[in-house]
Amino acid sequence: MVIGLLLAGQNLQAQLVDADTTKILNTEPLPEKIHSPRKATLYSAILPGLGQAYNRKYIKIPVIYIGFGVIGYFIDWNNDNYKINRTAYIHLTDGNDETNSHIKIAEEYGYDLDNATSLTNFKDGLTKRQDYYRRNRDFLVITMVGFYGLNIIDASVDAHLFQFNVNDDLTFRWQPAMQNLNNQTIYCIHCTFNF
């Protein structure tokens, strides 16, 4: 019985020693977490600025939202002006005396609606302003889509360059050299950039 306890104690002691050595062997630092460009791209596609947060480029997040806000503001402004001019044109051409939003615009621009030439010029002006504001609105919508794509590209590029080594050693070295090309010796200069 005593021998069995001694053997059990030795096995327990051997297990403790093994457990201690594995702890000592596993004290190596864990490898650095791999920064995924795919995650950054996906995050930025889901919510603009989230990819930049994943890349720890927090200063870019307000820039992104300010950009979206400015573009959105001008889309709304152009759309409002387009609607005003479209409504005025409809009211001018519908022949109904109760619809008169065009009168205020005509007075603002100095048109005399009783004069046939001035009335024709006013109609042309309303049509041109409608086209102008609609074109600007549509262009800004395309710009918004492009800005969204730029946000995704920025997050992806930052993620690819996340672990890029930025070193203070920015050197340029040159030295004379000889190259052999088609059995001819060419004297040249080798340049090396370190960055």
Image (cartoon, rainbow, N blue to C red):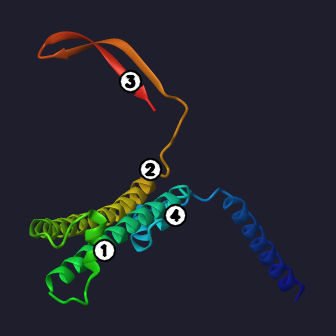
Check if mark 2's residue and mark 4's residue have beta carbons within 8 Å: no
Residue sitting at x 52%, y 40%: 166
61 left or right of 99 in image: right
Q: Nearer the viewer, residue 8 or 176?
A: 176
* Image quarter in which the N terminus is found: bottom right
Q: Residues within 10 Å of mark 2 (few under 14, many from 20)?
A: few
Judging by the rendered image, the residue that carries numbered circle 3 is: 192
Query: Which comes sooner in the sequence, label 2 or label 4?
Result: 4
Residue 132 visible (yes or no): yes
Query: Which comes sooner in the sequence, label 1 or label 4?
Result: 4
**Residue furthest right in the image:** 2
| Residue 135 x, y percent position in the rendering | 21, 65
Query: Which comes sooner in the sequence, label 3 or label 2?
Result: 2
At label 3, which amino acid type do we have?
A: Thr
Relative to 183, residue 7 above or below: below
Residue 104 marker: 1
Q: CA distance from mark 4 to mark 3?
A: 35 Å
Judging by the rendered image, the residue that carries numbered circle 4 is: 54
At label 4, which amino acid type do we have?
A: Tyr
Residue 186 marker: none
Q: CA distance from mark 2 to mark 4?
A: 13 Å
At label 2, which amino acid type do we have?
A: Leu
Q: CA distance from mark 1 to mark 4?
A: 53 Å
